[in-house]
Structure formats: C-alpha cells, structure tokens
Image (cartoon, rainbow, N blue to C red):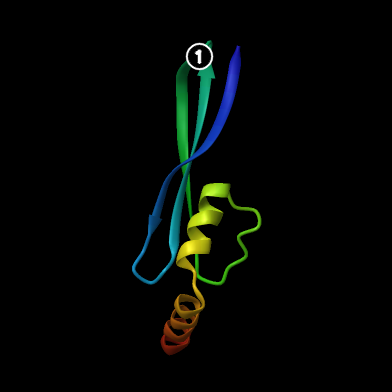
Amino acid sequence: MLEKIEVVDLIEVIENGSIQVRTKTAIKEDGVEISSKFHRHVVVPGADVSAEDAKVKAICSAVHTAGVITAYKAAIAAQGV
C-alpha cells in the first residue's frame, strides 16, 4: 500500500524574526520510505499564519512580538522594498 506523509520537520528562527519552515513529503510503500522531497518557505514577522502548522503558529506567537514586527517593517522600509 502506498502512503503519502507530510510533516513539518524543521523550523528555524532567523535573527530578524523570520521563521524558516521545511516540510518533508515522504512516500511509503508497505511502511518503507521509497521517496521524499522537501519544500521550504519563510514566515516573516506580521504575516498571516492561519494556514500554518500548529508548531509554526506557536513559534510565531512567541517570536513575532509587536517589537519584532515593528523592527522588521522598519528594516524592510529602510531597504526600499
């Protein structure tokens, strides 16, 4: 039997408050992994996290304070982005 499993397997907090998230998608046949791939994305301070994994939401809640969001937006504005 083939089975597809997706799991957030790595969450990193970057100095500017951004959260890097890696999701692993594994294909298993009869319980044995036969293939896998990774997808990465970044959650910046102040971003909508409603669709994120529960672990990512919890980390964002702890890290993305009002001060971190303000500092991130100021840094982006200073870069002219």
What residue sits 46% from the left and 82% below the top?
76
Is residue 60 rendered to the left or right of residue 11?
right
Q: Is residue 25 above or below residue 67?
A: above
Q: Residue furthest front?
A: 62
Q: Is residue 75 above or below residue 37?
A: below
* Residue 32 vertical placement versus 12 (above, below): above
Regarding residue 42, the answer to whether it shows in the image is no
Identified at 56% across, 55% down, the residue is 57
Residue in the foreground of this view, choosing between 12 and 37: 12
The image shows residue 32 at horizontal and vertical percentages of 46, 15
Of 35 and 74, the residue lying toward us: 74
Front-lying residue, 26 or 51: 51
The percent position of residue 60, horizontal first and vertical second, equals: 51, 61
Q: Please tell me how crowded label 1 is: few (under 14), some (14-19), or many (20+) other residues with Cα within 10 Å.
A: few
Considering only vertical position in the picture, is 27 above or below 45? above
- Indicate the position of residue 77 as horizontal and vertical percent values: 48, 87
Q: Secondary structure at mark 1?
A: loop
Q: Nearer the viewer, residue 44 or 36?
A: 44
- Quadrant the N terminus occupies: top right
Task: Tell me if 57 is positioned left or right of 51 in this view.
Answer: left
Residue drawn at (52%, 48%), measured in percent from left and top? 55
Q: Residue tagged by mark 1?
A: 31
The answer to whether any part of residue 69 appears in the image is: yes
* 10 relative position to 45: left or right: left
- Type of amino acid at the residue the image marks with label 1: Gly
